[in-house]
């Protein structure tokens, strides 16, 4: 019966629209394989499990040997085997199609990786300007990773790596860490595979030395920064933003007690958030406040921003790649402005 099933199956396939010899051969081989599997299954199972299939029930001394004669004429068993074989063929065909599509996609990706420059964006703005809030929207839209030197340094401090130990003091007081540390971090990071199509720099460069090192690094591969989104926010707004900020460590997502509260937030009798209720919307993990998000540290950070970072805009403006964004608007409006400014059309103006 098994052999007959295989022959029927092969004959049926030969009569279908799929007329290529190789497909027929594959189907025949698969049908034979399925039949063999079914036989092996039958041989291995105790007879109680074959109760639903009378033709498979074993008798007397032939209990562990499939007896072809016993299956003669049993349409149910044959149909079961046929559908098993059909499924196996369908599965193999689907798998082959997926492999073909994957190979085509890889070809296109390889072509872009080889010939096209990467999309290299920069988020520019004072502490609290909205870089960390808007970056994830760009990542979701373009699939580019957001590289925040602040997040990388905080991870290094938490892990107690040599870089973290060197950076800790400067970060806590609100000063910049030395150029060689951040240049080293970024030049390694942009070589990683997820930066293949481009990346979004957040918080780097912050000094003219860093900007020049970045330009030089990119020039090695014939690339350059293509777009800078410069968030302009009135200074008096920044303190409230920074002092009310809560962060999610794993993702770098930022929340705000007033402007972007997490869903879980509960207030005490004085209207202050209860720390234990501050949890990330997506993971439910605890949020934390940065040790440098204080009034005092902010003063020092703002001084460093005005003195060392702001002049960088003049380094990039003549290249025609700076887009100014009014970051003082509500979050959703800023998001819309960011999305509009990224189109090719916007680059013409
Ligand atoms: P940056 O990364 O530039 O330091 P963030 O994106 O972390 O700044 O924003 C600082 C704080 O301000 C966060 O708590 C954030 O939720 C809040 N925030 C960001 N953008 C706005 C906005 N447009 N309006 C009000 N609050 C904002
Ligand atoms: P924010 O944008 O809110 O000021 P970041 O998270 O970008 O904060 O940075 C936190 C701290 O990490 C900075 O105050 C500074 O000490 C250090 N840092 C981050 N990026 C750089 C950089 N490119 N150069 C020097 N120090 C940096």
Image (cartoon, helix red, strand yellow):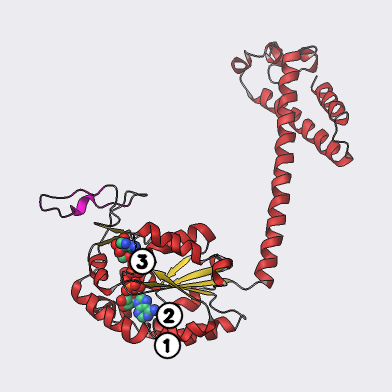
Which mark lies nearer to you, 1 or 3?
3
Label 3 CB-ligand 1 distance < 8 A: yes
Residue under numbered circle 3: 130
Q: Is residue 273 magenta-colored?
A: yes
Magenta residues (range):
264-280
Q: Secondary structure at mark 2?
A: loop
**For residue 219: magenta?**
no
Q: Distance between the Cα atoms at labels 2 and 3?
A: 17 Å
The circle drawn on residue 59 is none
Q: Horizontal and vertical percent for residue 299?
A: 22, 78
SS for callout 1: helix
Evaluate whether residue 44 shows in this view. yes
Do we see residue 164 in this rendering? no
Nearest to the eye among marks 2 and 3: give it. 3
Residue 205 is labelled as 2
Q: Is mark 2 within 8 Å of ligand 2?
A: yes
- Report the side of 120 relative to 149 (left or right): right
Quadrant occupied by the C terminus: bottom right
Q: On the image, numbered disc 1 is attached to which residue?
A: 208
């Amino acid at each position: 019966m098994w052999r007959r099933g295989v022959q029927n199956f092969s004959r049926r396939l030969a009569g279908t629209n799929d007329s290529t010899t190789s497909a027929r051969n594959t189907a025949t081989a698969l049908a034979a394989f399925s039949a063999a599997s079914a036989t092996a299954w039958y041989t291995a199972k105790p007879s109680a499990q074959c109760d639903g299939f009378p033709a498979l029930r074993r008798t007397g001394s032939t209990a562990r040997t499939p007896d072809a004669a016993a299956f003669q004429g049993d349409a149910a068993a044959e149909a079961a085997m046929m559908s098993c074989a059909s499924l196996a063929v369908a599965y193999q065909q689907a798998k082959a199609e997926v492999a073909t599509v994957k190979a085509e996609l890889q070809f296109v990706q390889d072509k872009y990786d080889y010939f096209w420059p990467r999309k290299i964006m920069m988020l520019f703005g004072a502490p609290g300007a909205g870089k960390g809030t808007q970056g994830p929207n760009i990542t979701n839209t373009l699939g580019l990773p957001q590289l925040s030197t602040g997040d990388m340094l905080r991870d290094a401090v938490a892990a107690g790596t040599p870089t973290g130990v060197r950076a800790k003091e400067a970060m806590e007081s609100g000063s910049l860490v030395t150029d060689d540390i951040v240049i080293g971090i970024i030049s390694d990071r942009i070589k990683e595979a997820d930066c293949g199509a481009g990346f979004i720099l957040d918080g780097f460069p912050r000094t003219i030395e860093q900007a020049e090192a970045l330009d030089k690094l990119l020039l090695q591969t014939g690339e350059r920064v293509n777009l800078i989104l410069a968030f302009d926010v009135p200074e008096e707004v920044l303190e409230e933003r920074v002092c009310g900020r809560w962060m999610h460590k794993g993702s770098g997502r930022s929340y705000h007690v007033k402007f972007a509260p997490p869903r879980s937030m509960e207030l005490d009798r004085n209207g202050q958030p209860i720390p234990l209720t501050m949890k990330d919307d997506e993971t439910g993990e605890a949020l934390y406040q940065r040790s440098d998000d204080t009034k005092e540290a902010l003063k020092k950070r703002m001084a460093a921003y005005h003195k060392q970072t702001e002049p960088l805009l003049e380094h990039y403006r003549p290249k025609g790649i700076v887009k100014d964004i009014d970051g003082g608007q509500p979050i959703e409006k800023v998001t819309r402005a960011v999305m509009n400014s990224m189109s090719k059309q916007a680059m013409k103006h």
